[in-house]
Amino acid sequence: MKGLLALLTFATTLSAFAACPSIELPTQFKAREQWASLGVDMDLSANKTRLGEIEERVVRLTPTFDLYNIDGKKVAHARKKLFSWGTTIEVSDCEGNLIGKVKENILRSIWDFYTRYEILDANDNVIAATEKMEFFSTEFKVFTHKDKKKEEIMRMTRPMINVLVDNWNIKILKEGVIDPRILVMIPAFKTSSDNEQREKEEKKK
């Protein structure tokens, strides 16, 4: 009887995960901020072919984003939690099951502040981290550390000059290491944070 209950529980869990639609993302694609939208909405595309969309929910106290595939079906949800040391972005599937987290740490160098992201799985294990380069553009390189070996698995680049909206170029160098539903949330939250900071600076003038 116990074995049957365990089997039924396992089958129910699998069906819950299977109920969520998927999104097909190639190894290179773009995330472009929509102009004149409420909050930060982004179109995902590759070679002028639309792949899906990220939409910000502006009614919340803290930013939340939903990821939709080309059919308009919800694939994932992300919400921001604020802490004294930085920000954590929790990413869940369409059923609310935790996929992983992105920890945003604001660090300070000799010249300026900069952002570093840590990507965690659902069990809070750090599986990758970013290194940010910002000279003539914003560039995040995502590295994983395995067997004491550092390997770049993804790169996200935003030009220094954007006309009205942000444009991100995303390149996955190694597939299968990190769930792409987690990675696509980083540009959306980064753009949202930068827009919020600009608004605060404008109000001070």
Image (cartoon, helix red, strand yellow):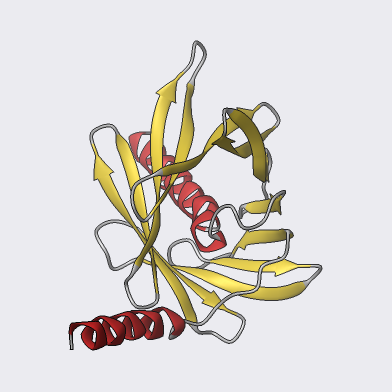
In the image, taking residue 78 as reference, residue 1 lies left or right, namely left
Pick the front one: 23 or 161: 23
Vertical order, 121 against 103 (above or below): below
In the image, taking residue 150 as reference, residue 101 lies left or right, namely left
Rendered-image quadrant of the N terminus: bottom left
Which residue is depicted at the point 32% across and 36% down?
Answer: 86
Rendered-image quadrant of the C terminus: top left
Q: Residue furthest right?
A: 47
Which residue is depicted at the point 29% across and 68% down?
Answer: 59
Pick the front one: 126 or 111: 126
Vertical order, 8 against 42 (above or below): below
Residue 162 image position (x, y, % from top left): 67, 47
Picture quadrant where residue 104 is located = top left
Picture quadrant where residue 160 is located = top right
Q: Residue furthest top?
A: 110
Whether residue 156 can be seen here: no
Whether residue 67 can be seen here: yes
Residue 118 image position (x, y, % from top left): 45, 40
Pick the front one: 76 or 54: 76
Which residue is depicted at the point 69% across and 50% down?
Answer: 174
